[in-house]
Image (cartoon, rainbow, N blue to C red):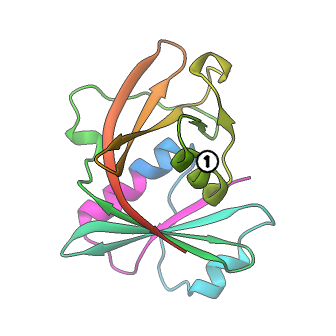
Amino acid sequence: MKFIITTSRRPPNKVRSFAKDIAFIFATKPLTRGKFSLKDLIKKLNNDDRLLIIDCKKGNPSRIRVIDKKGKVFQILLMGVKLIREMKEKPVFKNNIPMILNENEFSERISKILGLKLVKNIEDASSDCYVIKFVNEQNLFSLYIIDPENKKMFGKFFTIRKIVE
């Protein structure tokens, strides 16, 4: 499983930085979109890989389109995006794809969309990857990451308004 993370064409600086932050969490590097069409990007995927395209509205990241090899699209609508460089405490890079803390139905749903493993508690996660935690804030879910090594929580990176299938 790997992730190809890119942006819409000609993104503003904030969207480009957000793509780098998402790539950081998913232990990969963002792909510069250039003149790649959507079909070209999908051809780069293997069977269980995911393509994440970050779109913007008024210069800010507004949604992440998650596309699998078959072309099935999920849209994760965002609000309140915060970049890593804007945080007081910054996480350090981990080499492996993150896991999701299974605390609610939303975690299970997003795990299926992204194809990430679920863990019941932080102790079950390996120390060389992050654990993603979704916190319910008035029926909106905010993304935080936890370092299993020292149990330190970083975030809030963004809030998910809605998932469209």
Q: Is residue 69 above or below residue 36?
A: above
Q: How many marks?
A: 1
State the residue position of label 1. Answer: 108
Left or right side of 89 for 42 = right
Q: Nearer the viewer, residue 38 or 159?
A: 159
Going 47% across and 12% down the picture, which residue do you hit? 150
Please check the rendered image and state whether residue 6 is part of the magenta-colored stretch, yes or no: yes
Going 62% across and 56% down the picture, which residue do you hit? 114
Q: Nearer the viewer, residue 103 or 61?
A: 103
Residue 51 point in image, percent of width and height? 60, 67
What's the amino acid at mark 1? Glu
Please check the rendered image and state whether residue 108 is part of the magenta-colored stretch, yes or no: no
Residue segment shown in magenta: 1-20
Check the picture and name the quadrant holding the C terminus: bottom right
Q: Quadrant of residue 162?
A: bottom left
Left or right side of 64 for 87 = left
- Judged from the image, the secondary structure of the residue bearing numbered disc 1 is helix
Q: Is residue 145 above or below residue 122?
A: below
Going 58% across and 84% down the picture, which residue do you hit? 38
What crowding class fits label 1: few (fewer than 14 Cα within 10 Å), some (14-19), or many (20 or more)? some
Q: Is residue 56 above or below residue 118?
A: below
Q: Nearer the viewer, residue 44 or 73?
A: 73
Going 67% across and 20% down the picture, which residue do you hit? 124
Left or right side of 160 for 6 = right
Q: Nearer the viewer, residue 26 or 139?
A: 139
Residue 43 point in image, percent of width and height? 72, 79
